[in-house]
Image (spheres, grey):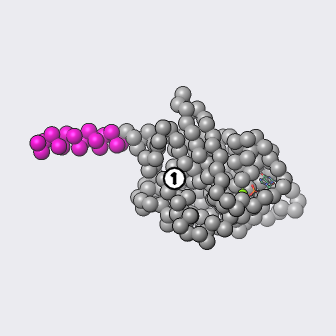
Amino acid sequence: MSTKNNNNNNNNNKFKVLLVGNFKVGKTSILLKYVDGEFTENYIATIGIDFKVKNIEIDNESLKFILWDHPRGCDRLRTITSAYYRNLNGIIFVYDITDKKSFSSIQSIWYPECKKYSPDKAYIPSILILGTKSDLRNQSNYKECVDTDQAREYAASIKALFFEVSSKENLNLDSSLLELFTQIKNNDSRTLDQNKNDQIKKQKSSCIIN
Ligand SMILES: Nc1nc2c(ncn2[C@@H]2O[C@H](COP(=O)(O)OP(=O)(O)OP(=O)(O)O)[C@@H](O)[C@H]2O)c(=O)[nH]1
Ligand SMILES: [Mg+2]
């Protein structure tokens, strides 16, 4: 799992990204704010399969990102879970900065699950770790927040991008997702270039054999 590469899933500049994390950390709110510009305090648990599409231009290329919202309880349905991880270009591990358990779950549940369901053990999608609800950090009732440096260190240890964000106040959402998407796009270009090189090598070697 050490190679950071893309699994060559580029189909007409379409990329698949999955959001995972404990229940109620704010996954759906990220998608709602980022794609539709909306935020609601009302909590509605995601129970079914759901996704949103973000069309974005990076370096004059039009790209389409399909953002999958991992449903709650899905971890009990292993066959469905493995389908979520298939052909992933990127994965976003989400925790709530006011909930330390949601951060430790990334290390104990979500990252191991990502590794387990990666079809090719040498392949790992681009990773972004998002600490949500950053607007709550300085509120008196949330003294015990996840330490930012600790989260940043962990992200570096698994070669992940890291940001603290707020869907409520629209802090860092655009910049963090743009950074992930740019990395995905660049990885994909490299993979395509690599494939071209491999094909040229194969053609050359078959010429020699013939
Ligand atoms: N203050 C604050 N509240 C937030 C933020 N993001 C989400 N919330 C609130 O947190 C609660 C849960 O948000 P959701 O986006 O539904 O969480 P989820 O991870 O999709 O939850 P499940 O679908 O059950 O896994 C809701 O009441 C949101 O209003 C944020 O940035 N700041
Ligand atoms: Mg949800």
**Residue 179: percent from the left, percent from the top?**
59, 42
Quick check: 24 left or right of 82? right
Which region is colored magenta?
Answer: 194-210
The answer to whether residue 175 is visible is yes
Q: Is residue 17 above or below residue 119?
A: above
**Residue 143: percent from the left, percent from the top?**
83, 63
Q: Determine the residue positioned at 59% across, 64% down.
A: 110
Element under disc 1:
loop
Q: Determine the residue positioned at 72% across, 64% down.
A: 23
Which of the four quarters of the rendered structure image does ligand 1 lie in?
A: bottom right
The amino acid type of the residue labelled 1 equals Leu
Residue 7 is inside the magenta segment? no
The answer to whether residue 148 is visible is no
- Prevailing secondary structure class for the magenta stretch in the rendered image: helix
Q: Which residue is mark 1?
A: 88
* Residue farthest to the right, as pictured: 140
Quick check: 17 left or right of 28? left
Q: Is residue 200 above or below residue 86?
A: above
Q: Nearer the viewer, residue 54 or 179?
A: 54
Q: Is residue 19 above or below residue 169?
A: below
Q: Quadrant of the C terminus?
A: top left
**Residue 34: percent from the left, percent from the top?**
70, 43
